[in-house]
Image (cartoon, rainbow, N blue to C red):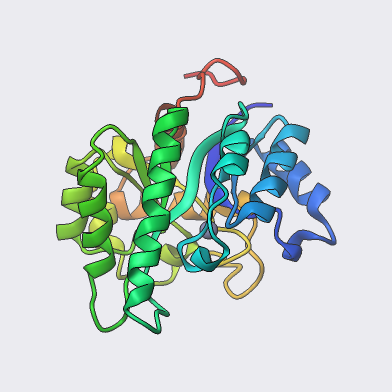
Amino acid sequence: MEVKYFDIHAHLNFKDFDADREEVIARCREEGVLVNNVGTDLVTSREVVELADAHEHLYATVGAHPTDWKKGFDEKEFHTLAANSKVIAIGECGLDYYRIKDESEKAEQKKLFVQHIALACSVGKPVMLHIRDSASKPGLAYADVFEILTREPGVRAHAHFFAGSWDIAERYLARGITLSFTGVITFARGYDEVIRKTPQNMLLTETDAPFVAPEPYRGKRSEPCYVREVLATLAELREEDPEELAAALLHNALRVLALPAGKFAIDK
Ligand SMILES: [Zn+2]
């Protein structure tokens, strides 16, 4: 397999892929796309580890989504999953204030996030951040995540589906937090400034499949191969050569996720 891209955030375990999962996975292999599937609770975390164990080009991230805090966090079970060699990150974890009904939920989400950081530290793997602001207080969830991470300088972190302002991005980047953007960047212009200003070595690629398919697939189910379209938009906005950018961002992913660069047929 000649590896060209790393979709560092997808959910191929979701029911959206039940009818043709193996075909989608085969297409990733043909197109040279490594995929990190991300769990959102204990059940889905087990699913992504099973997929990663069965396919060389698939990896897994285990954890509980911030909005799933009510399910609790089974430290022992998550630790067992996190120790698997195909598990490359812990999450998706962080803070999601978008649909919060009661302020007390914030404390519950923060507690769950801190538990993920502790697990990430104990297995020496980065955290995969999910951060979403409420419409009324833009920037607050990002600030709260940053404050919690400041207390844990040893933990590496990646912010998936980054939607913060450049001010926030600058603070995150200075902390060593890498950023990725989904297919939404092919049709929404609110991400352009951050995409242009982020140093190349701090960018990763993702699809968040089955969600937010890029143009020309907008509105349909997304799949990891569409990371091509995300990358084409990144290259266009940054006025960089798409192939060179693809190679650079693949190497960023291998570096951030601490994977050996020589494991697959990667030329540079
Ligand atoms: Zn996700």
**Residue 5 falls in which quadrant of the image?**
top right
Q: Nearer the viewer, residue 168 or 157?
A: 157
Q: Nearer the viewer, residue 223 or 233?
A: 223
> Can you give x and y, in whole percent of width and height, for residue 107 in the image?
33, 66
Q: How many marks?
A: 0
Q: Nearer the viewer, residue 148 or 6?
A: 148
Rendered view: 30 above or below 92 = above
In the displayed structure image, the side of residue 226 where residue 144 appears, left or right: left
> Can you give x and y, in whole percent of width and height, for residue 71 in the image?
57, 64
Residue at 31% of width from left, 82% of height from top? 135
In the displayed structure image, the side of residue 236 where residue 87 appears, left or right: right
> Can you give x and y, in whole percent of width and height, for residue 171 in the image?
16, 50
Q: Is residue 4 visible?
A: no
Q: Nearer the viewer, residue 263 or 219?
A: 263
Q: Residue furthest top?
A: 262
Residue at 30% of width from left, 70% of height from top? 190
> Can you give x and y, in whole percent of width and height, for residue 161 in the image?
41, 58
Q: Is residue 217 visible?
A: yes
Rendered view: 94 above or below 139 = above
Residue at 69% of width from left, 26% of height from top? 1
**Residue 233 falls in which quadrant of the image?**
bottom left
Q: Residue furthest right?
A: 19
Residue at 75% of width from left, 64% of height from top? 15
